[in-house]
Image (spheres, grey):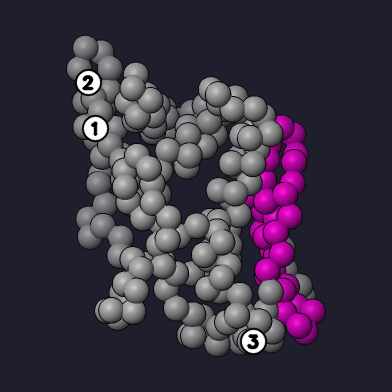
Amino acid sequence: MKSEQLDKLAAALAQAQAEMPAVPMNAVNPFLKNKYADLAEMIRVASPVLAKHGLSISQQPVSVDGQIGVTTTLLHTSGQWIEDTISLPLGDEKGKSLAQVAGSIITYLRRYSFGAIVGLATDEDTDGNAPAKNHERPEKPYQAKPEPQKANGKMTLEFALAETNRDGVKYGDIDTETLSNMANALAKMPKRTDEQERKLTAAQTILSARNGG
């Protein structure tokens, strides 16, 4: 959704993006030891630049038909705005209450929605010792085979780790919370394609391995 006019917002956003630095990866995945930028760091870096150009972001949790989501709105002082809503099914997770699961989903969706609506780039924190580089995607995203490699009738962990999401990021490089949310969303689908079934199996295989299963 958007306001009828977007000229002032678009001009302000273009100026803000030209000045926006890459967001340092300030958090570490406890399982994979890889770095990522958490929501607080995204807000800390982006807010001053957005405010300079009359922009702000509002994020509201929403709940519709058993799904938990977030509506993210980018506003301009002129009154112009754009917004979008994204949601995931609220499923059960071992060792977590529904409130904790909902909180995890909301945080996850807020982080990705915030970065997406502003166009943020994340990078390693060089602590001022080296110039920032653009966050790079794999040169050649992994192309999953039609049929998963199996051992004893089950998908191998090696194959599961090499599965990729729509952005070309390997499942093995995705943090456990995000991967669990992805698996829950796929599991809630009443009908799944062969590709979605493969991705669900890959996510479940990795989650099981990380949990010692």
Going from N to C along the chain, the mark reached first, 3 or 1, is 3
Q: Which residue is mark 1?
A: 159
Judge whether residue 89 can be spotted in this image. Answer: no
The kind of residue tagged 1 is Phe
- In the rendered image, residue 196, in percent from the top left (x then y), is placed at 43, 33
- In the rendered image, residue 6, in percent from the top left (x then y), is placed at 69, 80
Going from N to C along the chain, the mark reached first, 2 or 3, is 3
Residue at x-position 61% and y-position 75%: 47
Residue at x-position 27% and y-position 79%: 130
Q: Which residue is mark 2?
A: 150
Q: Along the horizontal axis of the image, is 89 left or right of 203?
A: right
Is residue 37 magenta-colored?
Answer: no
Residue at x-position 44% and y-position 78%: 21
Residue at x-position 58% and y-position 82%: 49
68 or 48, which lies in front?
A: 48
| Range drawn in magenta | 57-86
